[in-house]
Amino acid sequence: MSDIVPPEVRPKPAVPAKPPNVGAPTGHGTGQGHGGSHGAGVGSALLGYIGIDTIIEQMRKKTMKTGFDFNIMVVGNSGLGKSTLVNTLFKSQVSRRSAGWTRDEKIPKTVEVKAVSHVLEEGGVKMKLTVIDTPGFGDQINNENCWEPISKYINEQYEKFLKEEVNITRKKRIPDTRVHCCLYFISPTGHSLRQLDVEFMKRLSHSVNIIPVIAKADTMTMEERQEFKQRVRKELEMGGIEFYPQKEFDEDMEDKSDNDKIREAMPFAVVGSDKEYQVNAKRVLGRKTAWGIVEVENPNHCEFAQLRDFLIRSHLQDLKEVTHNIHYETYRAKRLHENGGLHPVSCNDTQESNL
């Protein structure tokens, strides 16, 4: 049997620049130039409305009916406010603590991976949100290789998706449990990254979208925070660690300009809270200190609003696409190359699972 060569994994293709003559009338709407060529018409003038623009509304209705999946993983030491931040991001009790976690539970002896799913609905759009927590990470005296259970979980989700794809009789909609985003929580030490931080991000940055955040930013002054952010960015660059959004995946100049601003602001220094306080006759989410109220959504107090807008309002779909087109395709190509191709599962084996 000849060797199966895996497909080359390439970044998403760049969007071509709009030709200067698009939309300009050419003759009588034939799309031909002055030379009368019979090539593909570019910039053809429509003689009336045909409804091409309704495709956007069709896609919106389809998405609203089916909903979509979004799986977010949180990684960091205990006590950094991971559960609280996720609850604040989605303004719901979606962390694992809302599913029965209590403070009396002991720190796990090894890293565990726990996933909790919720269905959120806003404006008629349904989203199945899965929060994957990693209790025990970085909490032991010896944290050697503590990233391995996390890496194993991420690859297991790719494997599940791949096996569904190669089935002879496939499900109409393959359940997507792949990790779309990993929020990595950095302790607000004000000094530098720990060796564990560097090793984790270096080893997993090529298999999942890592977004580093500085936890509990209200424990530092504004000057300390800015210095720490610059130091972290420099250490990430020196370590060759790529975090999302990666420069090579920028599709066009507009994307590059927007993403450059985000990359310059990262890692976001955040504060999470699910408690409300009265500030200037308004109810705000915040943390009460001896010096006043730290408002979570106030950009002058922390960068939570920037993280939320980036993660949910502008890049959520791109996170899913990069996961599928880059990280999953890399895993898929490697698996097919190693095994000489995955054998499809017979119809009898999948009939029960497809019901």
Image (cartoon, rainbow, N blue to C red):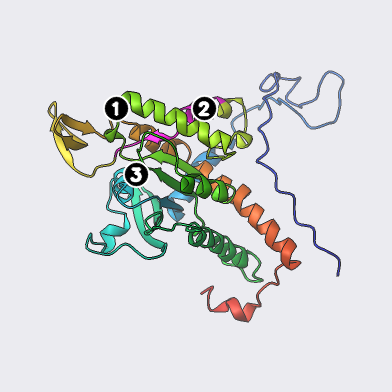
The answer to which of marks 1 and 2 sits earlier in the sequence is 1
Task: Name the residue type under label 2.
Answer: Asp
Q: Does the magenta-highlighted stretch encompass residue 213?
A: no
Task: Name the residue type under label 3.
Answer: Gly
Image quadrant containing the N terminus: bottom right
The answer to which of marks 1 and 3 sits earlier in the sequence is 3
Which secondary structure lies at badge 2? Answer: helix
Judge whether 95 appears above or below 56 on screen.
below
Which secondary structure lies at badge 1? Answer: loop
Q: Nearer the viewer, mark 1 or mark 3?
A: 1
Residue 173 picture quarter: bottom right
Residue 73 image position (x, y, % from top left): 43, 52
How far separated are the C-alphas under marks 2 and 3? 26 Å
Tag on residue 221? 1
Residue 276 picture quarter: top left
Question: What residue is drawn where x is 32% and y is 46%?
Answer: 80
Q: Is residue 58 visible?
A: no
Q: Check disc 2 and report the residue beneath it.
A: 258
Q: Is residue 295 left or right of residue 17?
A: left
Q: Is residue 304 left or right of residue 35?
A: left
Question: What residue is drawn where x is 37% and y is 59%?
Answer: 135
Task: Name the residue type under label 1.
Answer: Thr
Q: Which residues are magenta?
A: 257-271
Q: Does the magenta-highlighted stretch encompass residue 260?
A: yes
How far separated are the C-alphas under marks 1 and 2? 28 Å
Q: Check disc 3 and report the residue beneath it.
A: 123
Question: What residue is drawn where x is 35% and y is 56%?
Answer: 119
Q: Are marks 2 and 3 in contact (CB under 8 Å)?
A: no
Which secondary structure lies at badge 3? Answer: loop
